[in-house]
Image (cartoon, rainbow, N blue to C red):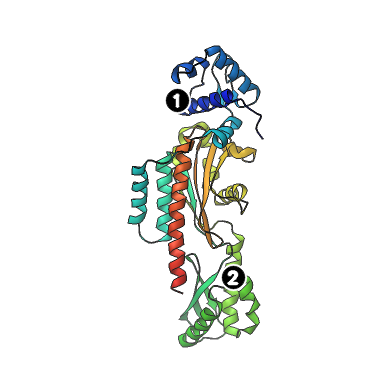
């Protein structure tokens, strides 16, 4: 994937990227020698920078100016040269304290995670709500409203609650409705779509009417890659012409879903992933980098946290922030899931 570099070229490329991230100005050989007290001449550095340009790691925007990193240069820096940065302990404690002060509600955690990442990165962020690989039935409730109208409340594992109206062939008393839901809840607790459909023929007419709607709800959810998206810091992208192009994309639910599917499509992928310049697939992300990671309970409940910003972002800090928040979210979701299972 990368053309080979000498140790000196690797070192100089790292310095070019760090210098450009710090001040946003094209980097010249004299600047590198003075700023980092290099034990080589400017001419030597200039020759190495020329070699790096030939290999596609840096480029010269103007003939008489310094160099800036290319997408390939940023990618090499992130994958091969970046330091193992950790958020300062006081920041970790502050973030942890915020989560433990929040209400024990999934929605509150999602909003807080997005706000923390946007503030820490000074960029934009998005967090997707945790979802099961396959929806799993928890319980259903039927409430007689009037005549043949019944309010049906469907609850799935992962905190998903859906409501819809069921119209019966004939009016039924609340006692009959409650009896049906009691049997269904015992029969299908923890079942996925296939398991429910396998027992459909064993149900009476009322139970089939209820489960038919449950199956429709679960099928729609299973077909939807991302249920809900929480965003923060979008205004931070408006300050730069390049990152501004990403705003409409991030505000559209289906396109964020596609981003998640594109870059976290492999079930075997783990840890934090860095996407630079849209990887040639997303023109609107041409001037952006995305740092994203999964969180949750493997094979049960999973979501994503992400930071979006300029390619000049401080990668070490942002990678550390995404990793730290995803770990906190995993612990919270794991505790939530364990408690939910214990109570059912």
Label 1 neighbour load within 10 Å: few <14, some 14-19, many 20+? few
The spot of residue 107 in percent (x, y) is 42, 58
Q: Reply above or below: 80 against 62.
A: below
Q: Is residue 89 left or right of residue 73?
A: left
Q: Reply above or below: 234 against 102.
A: above
Q: Quadrant of the N terminus?
A: top right
Give the numbered dot on residue 192: 2
Q: What residue sits right under mark 1 in the picture?
A: 23
Question: How far apart are the alpha carbons under marks 1 and 2?
Answer: 53 Å
Q: Residue at x 43, y 64 (%)?
A: 336
Q: Reply above or below: 9 against 149.
A: above
SS at mark 1 in the image: helix
The spot of residue 215 in percent (x, y) is 60, 72
Is the Cβ of the residue at disc 1 closer than 8 Å to that at disc 2? no
Q: Is residue 127 left or right of residue 217?
A: left
Which quadrant of the view contains residue 55?
Answer: top right
Label located before the other in sequence (1 or 2): 1
The spot of residue 341 in percent (x, y) is 47, 70
SS at mark 2 in the image: loop
């Amino acid at each position: 994937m990368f053309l080979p570099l000498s140790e000196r070229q690797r070192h100089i490329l790292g310095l070019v990227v760090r210098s450009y991230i710090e001040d946003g100005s094209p980097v010249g050989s004299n600047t590198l020698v003075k700023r980092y007290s290099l034990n080589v001449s400017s001419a030597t550095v200039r020759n190495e920078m020329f070699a790096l340009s030939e290999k596609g790691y840096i480029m010269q925007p103007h003939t008489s100016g310094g160099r800036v990193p290319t997408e390939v240069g940023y990618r090499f820096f992130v994958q091969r040269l970046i330091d193992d940065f950790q958020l300062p302990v006081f920041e970790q404690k502050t973030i942890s304290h915020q989560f433990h002060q929040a209400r024990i509600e999934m929605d509150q955690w999602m909003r807080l995670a997005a706000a923390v990442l946007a503030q820490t990165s000074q960029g934009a962020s998005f967090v997707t709500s945790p979802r099961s690989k396959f929806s799993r039935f928890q319980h259903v409730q039927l409430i007689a409203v009037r005549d043949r109208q019944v309010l049906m409340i469907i609850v799935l594992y992962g905190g998903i609650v859906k409501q819809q109206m069921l119209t019966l062939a004939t009016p039924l008393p609340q006692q009959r409705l409650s009896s049906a839901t009691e049997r269904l809840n015992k029969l299908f607790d923890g079942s996925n779509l296939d398991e429910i459909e396998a027992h459909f023929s064993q149900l009476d007419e009322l139970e089939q009417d209820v489960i038919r709607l449950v199956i429709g709800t679960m099928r729609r959810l299973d077909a939807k890659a991302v249920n809900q998206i929480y965003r923060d810091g979008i205004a931070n992208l408006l300050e730069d012409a390049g990152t501004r192009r990403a705003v409409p994309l991030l505000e559209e639910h289906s396109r964020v879903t596609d981003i998640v599917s594109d870059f976290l499509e492999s079930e075997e992928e783990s840890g934090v992933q860095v996407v630079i310049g849209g990887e040639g697939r997303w023109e609107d992300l041409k001037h952006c980098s995305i740092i994203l990671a999964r969180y949750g309970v493997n094979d049960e409940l999973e979501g994503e946290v992400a930071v979006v910003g300029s390619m000049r972002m401080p990668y070490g800090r942002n990678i550390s922030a995404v990793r730290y928040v995803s770990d906190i979210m995993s612990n919270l979701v794991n505790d939530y899931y364990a408690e939910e299972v214990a109570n059912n």
